[in-house]
Image (cartoon, coloured by chain):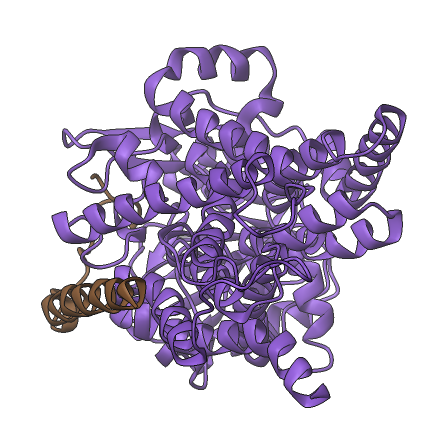
Chain colours: A brown, B purple
Amino acid sequence: MIRVLAALAVGAVLAVGASVAVVNVAAPTPEPPNRPLYNYGDK
Amino acid sequence: MRTARVGAAAAPALLGLLLGALALGPALGPGFVLRYDMVFVPDPPLTLPGQGFPRAVPSDLVVALLSQIAPAQAVQKAILLGIFVLAASGAAALVPTGRLGPRLAAAAFYAWNAYLAQRLLLGQWALLLGVAGLPWAVRAASLGGRLRLAVALLPAAVGGFQAILVSAVAVLATAATAPCAAAARVRRAAEAALILGGLSLPWLIPALLSEATTDPEGVDAFAARADGPFGVLGSLLGLGGIWNAHATVPGQGSWWSAGVRLVLAAVAVWGFVRLRARTRRPPAGGRDRDAPPYWTGLAVAAGAGLAIACLGAFAPGAMKVLIGWWPGFGPLRDGQLHLASFALLQAVGLGGVVMGGVMDGAVDRAPGSPAGPVPGTRAVAAVAAVAAAVPVLVLPAFAMGAFGRLAAVDYPDEWRRVQAIVNADPAPGALLSLPWGAHRAFGWNGGRVILDPASKLFARRVIWNDELLVGLPGGGRIAVAAEDPLVTRVGAVLRGRPDERAEALAGLGVRYVLVHMSDNAFHGGVMLFQGRELRLLRLDDRR
């Protein structure tokens, strides 16, 4: 039973984190135009 | 009872289909999904490899063949969904239990992780064919059987050189360490090498015949890079670290996402190690078991992949020496690519964690062993559901085409008209695509960056600039030299006097010049088509 509760707790924490992450990216800024290269990023 | 068994067997594949639909989202609508290397075109021509390095061989040819019987955009969507189905079902097949929960956990992880997401956002569908088939190839190598292995490697064979490379290490390591007699192991490894070699011929022969070169500068350009707060190594352990900043899942670099992925990776690796440890110390009341026959091979392949990924990032000099010595080491430049086996190891490990957690004792209890606490059906279902959902919750922004990074669009009509004009001409001669750069960002494609579609649209040699410019963190850029010698010669002509270009290009065997309207530097030739976006010119052959 403890294991089940632990699993559900982990699932709940992840679900909250995922919700926050999704809300943060739901209105994304446009992708960088990468203008001079039409190419790759610079992270 | 039989229906339940069939349902349980098909569940991982169905989960893969579900995850594929969730990940692709808007990309499954009418039209083509175009992003970086993923370039599908309407009515792709049946052509043999050109003279540069055969990067899309035989994948483009297979797509062209399939497009003879179905629309190319339907072929693309079937391939993309098939990757998820194949990956999920294969990972589940490697988990050493018949229980659904652990198998679904492995399936979900392998079909929904940062590695697969990043490679998909880089458009490397051909590589992902090999990645998706990898668990099946590992399984076949561990079980033995030439035909079984050849069939399991077919997706990789279709994918081409990168797909075969990520499969080869795992297959050879698994065959060489399978739990059987030494002579049998040697025979299996030799057979696996022969099969891999045979399936590589479609791209290996053109590669050896081509005069393509490999620029060691690509080591710096394609080395793994940090995509979160835990540095390069932390990114790689969490299956991230791709070199391209635009191929990351939105929000992937946040503390939350990077941290949770790292924790999940640690748990999964622990689960994989535990699969082995349990053989030496079987659970109380349980029977002794052998480690999965692929355990050592997969561990070796995953370690090798991680080492290759680290080499380019932490010891680029050594990699450059290798490539300078033999250009065949070129495929090692993009080190993060070789994490596929590590992703599979983590998937199986996660399945092992679920298998060894709540279900421990109920799973593999030996007949007649003393009864212990057996988890209820609802408890098992709850843990299985959480385990299958964890990979999605850890990387939620991969959903819906990574929130718009993948979408379906249609080519403007003028692209098809230009294609029809050129492909109706039986006269020989190459087509030159301008502007002189490898990538395009069309408004009709939402500004998403793609490889020049002209490179796949015509039934004749297309000359396009395969030089890559890659940005660096400090703001600088690296130019990775073109691999095709003809590209170098054409580039020199384009840098020459404008009034001599047309004649010089005709002398190099160029018959057509396709110019995007963003480039108005080329003049000369006979105008065959003028649209809003494209201009098609034909040069006189003065050779």
> Does residue B189 appear anywhere in the picture?
yes
**B172 on left or right of B501:** right
**Along the line of sight, the residue nearer the viewer: B12 or B272:** B272
Q: Position of residue B24 (x, y in %)?
A: 40, 73
**Along the line of sight, the residue nearer the viewer: B19 or B54:** B19
Quadrant the C terminus of chain B occupies? top right
Residue B234 in the image: above or below residue B502: above
Q: Position of residue B392 (x, y in %)?
A: 33, 66
Q: Quadrant of residue A8?
A: bottom left
Q: Position of residue B218 (x, y in %)?
A: 41, 27
Task: Report the number of discs.
Answer: 0
**Along the line of sight, the residue nearer the viewer: B373 or B529:** B373
Q: Quadrant of residue B27?
A: bottom left
Residue B112 in the image: above or below residue B262: below
> Does residue B405 appear anywhere in the picture?
no
Residue at (52% x, 35% y) in the render: B302
Quadrant the N terminus of chain B occupies? bottom right
Residue at (64% x, 41% y) in the render: B291
Residue at (57% x, 25% y) in the render: B213
Residue B74 in the image: above or below residue B308: below
Q: Position of residue B65 (x, y in %)?
A: 74, 69
**B118 on left or right of B160:** left
Q: Residue furthest front?
A: B370
**Along the line of sight, the residue nearer the viewer: A38 or B77:** B77
